[in-house]
Image (cartoon, coloured by chain):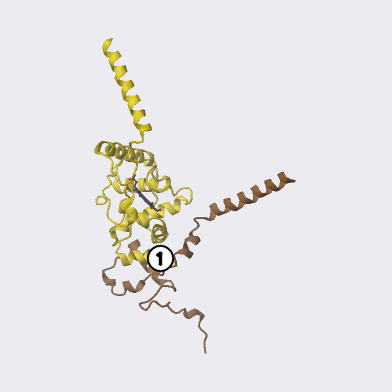
Chain colours: A brown, B yellow
Amino acid sequence: MKILIKRSLTAITSVVLLSNIAYAHDASMHKKSNAEKPKCAAMNNADHSKMDMEDPVMLAIMAQCMKKSHTTDTGKKVMDHSSMKKS
Amino acid sequence: MIHSKHLGIGFLIIILSSIGFLYSGLFPMGADNKHNAFTFWVLETLRTKSIARAASNIEVPPLNSPQLLLSGGADYNDMCSGCHLKPGQEDNDMALGLYPAPPNLTVSSDKHGHAHEDDSHNDIDATAKQQFWVIKHGIMASGMAAFGPTHDDERIWAMVAFIKRLPTLTPEQYQIITARQ
């Protein structure tokens, strides 16, 4: 009986530990600890005519700032128009 | 014959005194103590040659996509910027206190003071291979950890792609690209 308890305890502990290792660096884990929003207002004054629209850096910035949740100057969330009620 | 006998005794003395030095505890182990020029050269040569050889057969995938920059940027900010700095940052505790010091990856490689051992004519490719290898396997007895056990190759290549563009980023661009939302 004692041995059985010991073994199952070891089994449970290993499963818990191993599953933790597997998930330890899943990208979604980082998300919670670092929920900073991209400060897209910094790009407002950029001269768009001088931008290289094929540059991956510019494309990455645009992708980040197209998302609904970036912040504006005031630090408030951009409104989510899709969830507004029509009157 | 007398010559080889003297040589043997000489070697024995060197070996015994080296072992004596090990056990004496006289070696200064602190990270605030710098290597002398000879030890530095030995370690530097060991590192660059070893990494260049180990990385030489790695195939570099295309690294020019915004998705890679976003994945690699967020990971870099979380896991690497503490040692390798962010644009606009000159120093921090880790950059100052670690020995060997983590190179400042926000400036281009000729400025961050690490000579790269280039095994091909294509410098950019060789740098990418070596960076991939270092991120995956780490560098023994330095602060640089192996991220391979916890990150797949795709995430590591994304960090290589990000590091390649990092010296060109302003602090504002860096903030936007690395933010996780």
Q: Residue furthest right?
A: A1
Q: Position of residue B143 (x, y in %)?
A: 38, 48
State the residue position of label 1: B179
Q: Residue at x 42, y 52 (%)?
A: B156
Q: Quadrant where the N terminus of chain B lies?
A: top left
Work out whether residue B161 or residue B33 is closer to the camera in this orientation and state it: B33
Q: Position of residue B74 (x, y in %)?
A: 41, 61
Work out whether residue B113 or residue B39 is closer to the camera in this orientation and state it: B39
Residue A1, can we see it? yes
Q: Residue at x 48, y 48 (%)?
A: B149
Left or right, B52 with respect to B38, comes to: right
Q: Amino acid at mark 1?
A: Ala
Please tell me whether residue B3 is drawn above or below residue B90 in the rendered image.
above
The chain that hosts pointer 1 is B
Q: Position of residue B111 (x, y in %)?
A: 24, 52
Residue A51 quadrant: bottom left
Please tell me whether residue B175 is drawn above or below residue A21 in the rendered image.
below
Residue B63, can we see it? no
Please tell me whether residue B175 is drawn above or below residue B64 in the rendered image.
below
Q: Quadrant where the C terminus of chain B lies?
A: bottom left
